[in-house]
Image (spheres, rainbow, N blue to C red):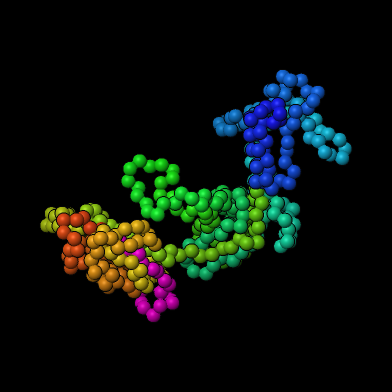
Amino acid sequence: MESSYGQRGKDYVKWAANMALGLRAGVPWVMCKQTDAPGEIVRNTAFNTAKNYGAFLEKDGAGFKGQIKLTGFKNGDIDLSKASWTYQVGLKGEVQKIFTIEENEKARWTELKPDAAPSIFTWYKAYFDAPEGTEPVALDLGSMGKGQAWVNGHHIGRYWNLVAPKDGCPQTCDYRGAYHSEKCMTNCGKPTQSWYHVPQSWLQASNNLLVIFEETGGNPFDISVKSRVSGILCAQVSESHYPPLRQWLNPDVIDGKVSIKDMGPEIHLQCEGGHIISSIEFASYGTPRGSCQNFSEGNCHSPNSLSVVSKACVGRNSCFVEVSNSGFQDDPCRRVVKTLAIQARCVSSSTVGVSQF
């Protein structure tokens, strides 16, 4: 192909090789020019995938057009030149609903050995017990490649473990101005997603059925089911922001006894149920810089910031902090619009000798 089609042929061969390696298929399919093939047929040889959407997709023409053979078999070559090609929508396992509790035994499952080599286009199933507690539950599919997952017949959706480029994450993030896809990127060099939420309502105490359809190869033995709790809370509110909705619903405001202009903005922090704010890791009223887990003090900072926020929040499940000079008993920089940035940590109330408020 490279000699016949020049740079286009080289690009196609490189693409096909990368695809085969990515799928770990072992021996890739190779489209070759036969010496005795008519020129017109070779030039028209193509894989028709132009249309990949719309009604009756499976009835549209598809596949190779021209002369094509599969070689290397013990019983000789297989000529596919006159084969009728079409799309197949869905999988046999999906049609049989082998991902459900009622129908999963329709498939002829075999036991998977720990030392088995990763395989493509493979169905896996396992049973697991639900984690204790009421915290959100998630599947860690970081060891898998690309595919779909079901829990007790419920479709979690597709997963695809792609690793983000190592470069491109800025030190600081500013969303102002026109948006583009590389703006404020995070987690460079890390998987784009590995945790997938499983609603508690889908689970039973034990014997939950997990079914995976893996397309590119992965290690299902490293899949785990864990409770996930947000351990870090962050918030950032400016004194120029509007008051929260709960203040607008104040009866005195509704009756006109108090003007909404007399009310200031505030920050509301709240941990998951059964958890409390154990510490304030950062607090700055002034001109703080950075973003969550990367905050720093700016040129303007009230020295009362940490003590005011800690007094209002530590030991509680939720708290409100007023964003104003009066709230911090200080105006750290006059004629400058100030912002309050907070980073707090939540822990389970059962592990701390402090009652939940």
Locate residue 211: give its quadrant: bottom right
Q: Is residue 355 magenta?
A: yes
Is residue 83 visible in the rendered structure shown here? no
Q: Position of residue 231 (x, y in %)?
A: 42, 66
Given residues 113 and 176, the one toward you in this image is: 176
Image coordinates for residue 50, horizontal then vertical, percent: 60, 29
**Residue 256 at what x, y percent from top left?**
13, 54
For the point 58% across and 57% down, which residue is it? 141
Picture residue at 74% right of the left edge, 20% below the top: 39
- Which residue occupies 78% across, 27% down? 34
Is 121 located above or below residue 244 in the figure? above
Above or below, comparing residue 166 to residue 2 in the picture:
below
Residue sticking out furthest to the bottom: 353
Q: What residue is rendered at 41% in x and 52% in y?
A: 170
Horizontally, is 162 left or right of 253 in the view? right
The image quadrant where one finds the C terminus is bottom left
Q: Hey, which quadrant is residue 270 in on the image?
A: bottom left
Quadrant into which the N terminus falls: top right
**Is residue 329 shown to the viewer in this render?**
yes
Q: Which residues are magenta?
A: 341-357
| Residue 219 in picture, x, y percent from top left | 65, 57
Q: Nearer the viewer, residue 17 or 102?
A: 17
Q: Is residue 163 above or below residue 19?
A: below
